[in-house]
Structure formats: C-alpha cells, structure tokens
Amino acid sequence: MAEYDLVVRGGEVATGFGTTRCDIGIREGRIAALAERLTDAAAVVEAGGLLVLPGGIDSHCHIEEPARGGYVSARGDAPPPVTVNEESFVSASTSAFAGGTTSVVCFVPQWKGEGILPRLADYEQRAARGMLDYSFHQIITDPTDAVLEREVPEIVARGIRSLKVFLTYEPLHLSDEDYLRVLVTARRNGCLVTVHCENYAAIKWRTEALLRAGLTGPKYHAWSRPTVVEREATHRAIALAELVDQPIQVFHVSCAEAAEEIARAQHRGLKVWGETCPQYLMLTGADMDRSTPEQGAFAGAAFMCSPSPRTPAEQARIWEMIRRGTLDIVSSDHCGFSMGGERGKAANGRDASFDAIPNGIPGLAARLPILFSEGVSKGRLSLDEFVRLTATNPARLMGLAPRKGVIAVGADADLALWDPAKRVRLTNALMQHAIDYTPYEGLEVTGWPVTVLRRGAVVMRDGVVQAEPGTGRFLPRGPYAMVRPRGVLADGFDAAPPPA
Ligand code: URP
Ligand code: ZN
Ligand code: ZN
C-alpha cells in the first residue's frame, strides 16, 4: 500500500509565513507530510508551480436559511410567511468550491416564541445534504431563560460556539437588555458573540421619514442607514461587551467610523474583532442608484445589503483598516436573493419600496478571487495577509484551528491550487450559485482557483465541481483562539473559558 493516498506535487505552498516549494502528502484526508519530494503515492496532482493555498473559510454566509420575516423591514409590520434562502447547501457547496472555499460557518435561525433546538434539528438536516464542511452560528432573537440556561449549554456541548445577535431588523433585533443577557450567557458558556451593528430605532425613524417623502427606490436604502447608525451600534455593542467582559466579533464593517470604534477597543486590550466583506471594498451607494432599460430603478436592488455599500473614500479606509489589522477577517456575508422569482428581490413587486426588498447579496464564489485580485495582485496585501484574512484567522476565531485554515501536518487537506496570473472576467455563470445574478458581473480579476481539494479529495478542477451531495461534514468547534491586531497570531493559545 502506498504511503500517501495523494501527493500534491511541486506547488508554491502558502504557509501564512511566506511560501515554500514542496510536495504535500495526504493520508486519510489529512496532511501527513510536507517535503521537497514525496514519491510513494497512490495518486498525484501536479501543482506545477501554482500557489497552494489553504481552502478558504467563509465564516459568515447565509445558506438555505429558513426565515420568518428577517432581513427586510424596519417598519414593524406583521411578520411575513416563512421563506428559505434560494441557495441550498448543494448549490452553495458548488459555488464555494468554484471559488476556492471549502468550509463555511452559517446560521441557525431562532424564531420568536420558540426555543433554538427545533430549528437546529431542521437546519442540521439541510446542511448535511451539502458537500462543504460546515459549522453554525446560533442566532438568538428571543433570549428566554429556557434558551439561555438550558439550550445554549446543550448546543455548546455539541460544538456550536458562537451566538449571533442583530441590533437591527424587524423582527430579529435585540434590546440592549436582551443583548446583555446573551453576552452574559456567552461568557458563562465560552462562546463568541457575533454582532450585526446598526441602530434599529434610527433606521426605523429614517425609513418612515423617507417613505413619507415618497423617497422609496433602492438607493434610499443607503439613506435610511448612514454611517452614524453603524458607528453608534458598534460603539454600544463594544461598550456592553466590555461591561460583561465578553469577546465579540463585529460583522460586516462598512465604514471607517465603525472600524475606528473597533480599533479603539483593541487598543484598550479588549477582545473585539472586526470582519469586512468584498462588497465594502468594491461597491458603493451609487450602485443602488443604477437603472437599466429592463429593470428601471429596481436594478439598484441587486446591490442592496446591510450595512449599505458606502463611498470610494470609505472603501479606501476599509482597505487601510484591513492593512492595520483592525479588520482581520474577510467573509462574504453571502445572502443571495435572485432579482426575479418568488423568493427573490422582486417578490414584493418591482415597485416595492426599499424597506420591502430583501437585503443581501451573493458572494461565496467571488470572495477569494476579488480579494486576491484587488489585494494581492494590486499590491495592497501580501499573500500571507490574504491567507490569514480568508482562512487562518477565521479558523482561529471560530475555534476550527488547527484542523482548518492552515497547510500543516495534521490539518485537513483542504487546498486551493491557485493561478496568480490567470485573468478572468466575472460572470454569473462562473459563480455557479443558485442566484440569477452577481453584483460583480464584468469585473476583471487576476488570480483564480484551478483545482480545489476538500479533505484530500479533488472537488473542483478547471471550474468543474465533482462532489457527492452529503459528503460535507459538520465541524464541531472548540473555543475561539485569539487573532491579534495586524493579523499576527498569538503566541499561546489564548482561549475562551471551558463550558460551565
Ligand atoms: O444585507 C445583509 N447583510 N443580509 C444578510 C443578513 C445580515 O445582516 O448579515
Ligand atoms: Zn448582518
Ligand atoms: Zn449576514
């Protein structure tokens, strides 16, 4: 019997601390050896000088997520009926592999009036049908005593180590009091808390005023939630977390003001981490003002997400905050709604006001190529920074390290063979998702995944995804590990307290 099931031969292996030309020996899905020359292999994948990157980890994506209400309105209307994201775990897996991502952390919903376990059981079944490796954040919208005292310890024991809260959206948002209760519970159970930071009341107030004035088109979505509502909620989220001494990750930071709140907290030594997404580097509010002959002003809905895309000046500041290490994870916040179709952006009609159009954009496949191209190829980021932002840091913060996020002996053999010189014009077809558009249509990128391995199996080659549905694995997570400012890993394993 051969020593290795597979050897990846002759790649420039990205370790996160420079690259080294070597072979990777894989046994039973894990990396068994890194050496100049490995010969005793049952099969060989020739890397031929391509970069070999750790498979991307997307620690913020919404996949096949059932929602009752969510992500739409700040008006407080009666909750709409239950809908499920168009992106299934199978289509999301295909899209993720096409773009070089091999693991995701997505969201288990909680509906007000219910506990968390019923929705978890349903979501586990959905996720098990995909091909990606996956873990969950548990959304908390109704923090009853039963949820916090009985159910949270149970999910933590099952390896779900992050609680997600929203400070906006009807009907998801939490009051400060409820947010505090979640923070205390997280601290007691050794969980990370991830937070959507926008001020619910301010958005509601602005939205009502805009609608009264007849300003209803997609572009007014940005007007309803200017940077100050994000800055305020970010400040509050951090201040209350400081009060409880509970680590948090601020999701999808879109503007410098919010990032500066995070930087100040980090400077004071607080365990606060910040994530941003390609949309805040590539899109602006002006995109929501686009109009086409077919769609009219509704075309702007394609770019509508929360927080809103901002301005070129904010984009530049977000790059700066990435380089400074304030923002240390780049996720997609993939939350796709087609422009057409029953579950899409036009579900309430193309004349619907902006507050009745589902928020969110697709970005699972586009995340790595865009960040590589705009970051590494254009000289804004080193390759090491790219690897840390897209794989190593999310793995550590999500408690998936050292199994995921690095190319090292013992880690899962999740690898993306990457051609740094390949130029590709993005199209929706290349995204291989279930959504009928990409907000990045026509964008030219330099750098592209050629072959992807998940746990040692080739799942994508030259854009063709081949993986059996049901082969993705649930990833039980340990406690979060620190990611330090400037992207430098902590020396020791500074971990959350064990579950009570
Ligand atoms: O617009 C967005 N971001 N939709 C997805 C849900 C969320 O807020 O993360
Ligand atoms: Zn959010
Ligand atoms: Zn999200």
Image (cartoon, helix red, strand yellow):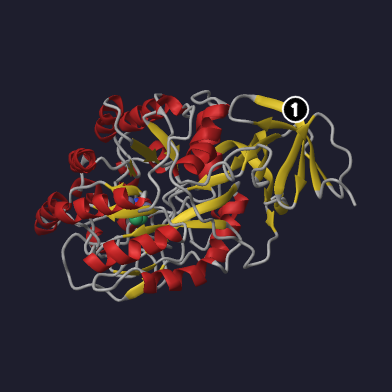
Q: Residue at x 47, y 57 (%)?
A: 159
Quadrant observed for ligand 1 in the rendered image: bottom left
Q: 31 or 16: which is nearer to us?
A: 31
Most extreme residue toward the bottom is: 81
65 relative position to 23: left or right: left
Vertical placement of 334 versus 442: above or below?
below
Vertical placement of 446 versus 211: above or below?
above
Relative image position of residue 3 (x, y in whole percent): 85, 46
Relative image position of residue 406 (x, y in whole percent): 60, 38
Q: Residue at x 58, y 45 (%)?
A: 404
Task: Tell me the quarter of the picture where residue 154 sits.
Answer: bottom left
Question: 10 Å neighbourhood of mark 1: few (<14), some, or many (≥20)?
Answer: some
Relative image position of residue 429 (x, y in whole percent): 58, 56
Relative image position of residue 356 (x, y in whole percent): 25, 64
Q: 109 or 299: which is nearer to us?
A: 109
Q: Which residue is mark 1?
A: 21
Q: 324 or 456: which is nearer to us?
A: 456
349 relative position to 137: left or right: left
Most extreme residue toward the front is: 500
Tell me, yes or no, if residue 240 can be seen here.
yes
Which secondary structure lies at badge 1?
A: strand
Tell me, yes or no, if residue 306 can be seen here.
no
